[in-house]
Image: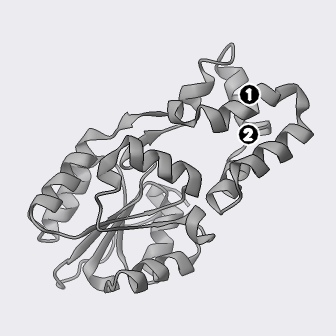
Amino acid sequence: MTHADLPPASPSRTPLEAVVFDVGGVLLDWNPRYLYRSLLADEAEVDRFLAQVCTPEWNAAQDAGRTWAEGVAELTARFPEHRDLIRAYDERWAEMVAGTLEETVAVLDTLRAAGVPTYALTNFSAEKWTIACEKWPFLADLDGAVVSGVERVSKPDPAIYRLLLDRHDLTADTTFYTDDVPVNVHAARSVGLRAEVFVDGSTLRGQLKAAGLPV
């Protein structure tokens, strides 16, 4: 499912009461290429390594609760020739984050200043979430966060969206969610959240303003 396949959510007259953010690709500019471009000779090698060795599926297992020690051990057993590169994914994880996406963080700051409750719902390893909250304290200052690696359930499983709503006593129809992955937005809508695909901070601000929030 691509962004083009997913139409905008149907408008609702119910006022929004909370906003939920995905993190990677929405609040943080995360991409493993940022690290591996400094470790491999060219873009073709980066493409090959991330498609064949440290794959998205392998990383997703850490996001689902597997420890990094387990993940690295499993992969180095399969690809011993790439041991150092595999360990770098864990040990130099912070170098995969180019920084914050400032336009989105500015929207978050505006919402918080206006007293709008803000939350995170993210596919993130438990270990790296601790690091991220230390490095970018605004993540720890959110009203709450549901992290896949902690809960051992990942988007787009509807269970993680229901967990968000139940744990923080949120009503789906009054809660806005933004995520850069269309299938995650589709899943959020399936449980009643007012969800939109994240494009950029400016677009997000416009979506929230159209929904009546003071941004």
128 and 175: which is toward the camera:
128
Quarter holding residue 198: bottom left
The C terminus lies in which quarter of the figure?
A: bottom left
Name the residue: 49% across, 57% down.
181
* Residue where numbered disc 2 is placed: 54
Total numbered labels: 2
Colour style of the rendered protein structure: one colour
Amino acid on which the number 2 mark rests in the picture? Cys
Give how far across and how far down residue 145 sits, in percent: 40, 66
Question: Measured along the vertical axis of the image, is residue 30 above or below residue 210?
Answer: above
Determine whether, in the image, residue 214 is placed left or right of residue 53. Answer: left
203 and 170: which is toward the camera:
170
Determine whether, in the image, residue 55 is placed left or right of residue 195. Answer: right
The residue mark sitting in front, 2 or 1, is: 1
- How crowded pointer 1 is (Cα within 10 Å; few <14, some 14-19, many 20+) is rated as some
- How crowded pointer 2 is (Cα within 10 Å; few <14, some 14-19, many 20+) is rated as many
* Residue where numbered disc 1 is placed: 85
Give how far across and how far down residue 169 sits, in percent: 33, 86
Name the residue: 32% across, 40% down.
101
Give how far across and how far down residue 76 sits, in percent: 85, 38
Amino acid on which the number 1 mark rests in the picture? Leu
Does the rendering let one see residue 137?
A: yes
112 and 30: which is toward the camera:
112
Q: Marks 2 and 1, how far apart in space? A: 9 Å
